[in-house]
Image (cartoon, helix red, strand yellow):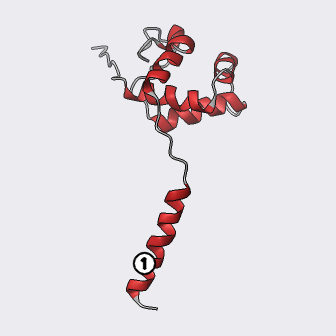
Amino acid sequence: MTTIRRHLMALAAASALVATAPVQAANLEAGQAKAKAVCAACHGVDGNSALPDYPKLAGQHRDYLEKALRDYKSGARKNPVMAANAAALSQEDIANVAAWFNAQSAAVRSRY
């Protein structure tokens, strides 16, 4: 088999995988609305919590936030408050909320 033929076959296989992968664009407006309703009391409206007991979510990686919420929802990650909040979120809500917080600018404060 020629090198060109191998490359074409590999390209065709990769294209088939990409074509079958689900592509879902996050809805930032829906993420903002859900974050305001579910997350803002502890994490702040824009994810910059003013309370030291709650992490700042603004600017966090989207995939990290999605995994954390899925883990709270499934029970793989333990926290009763977060488990209850995550239980109310659909997979679409999780993607939208994660995208919303990811799109926010993190407020960094210096202690010095």
Residue at 54 percent of width and 53 percent of height: 21
Three-letter amino acid code at the position of disc 1: Leu
Examine the image and state in which quarter residue 84 appears. Answer: top right
Residue 81: x and y in percent read 66, 15
Residue 77: x and y in percent read 67, 30
Relative side of 96 to 84, left or right: left
Q: Is residue 6 above or below residue 65?
A: below
Examine the image and state in which quarter residue 88 appears. Answer: top right
Residue at 50 percent of width and 38 percent of height: 63
Examine the image and state in which quarter residue 70 appears. Answer: top right
Relative side of 2 to 65, left or right: left
Q: Is residue 103 above or below residue 47?
A: below
Count the labels in the image: 1
Q: Nearer the viewer, residue 2 or 104?
A: 2
Residue at 55 percent of width and 11 percent of height: 37
Identify the element where label 1 is drawn.
helix
Residue at 33 percent of width and 18 percent of height: 107
Q: Nearer the viewer, residue 41 or 88?
A: 88
Relative side of 38 to 74, left or right: left
Residue indicated by mark 1: 8
Residue 52: x and y in percent read 47, 11
Q: Is residue 57 above or below residue 63?
A: above
Residue 58: x and y in percent read 41, 23
Most extreme residue toward the right, as rendered? 75
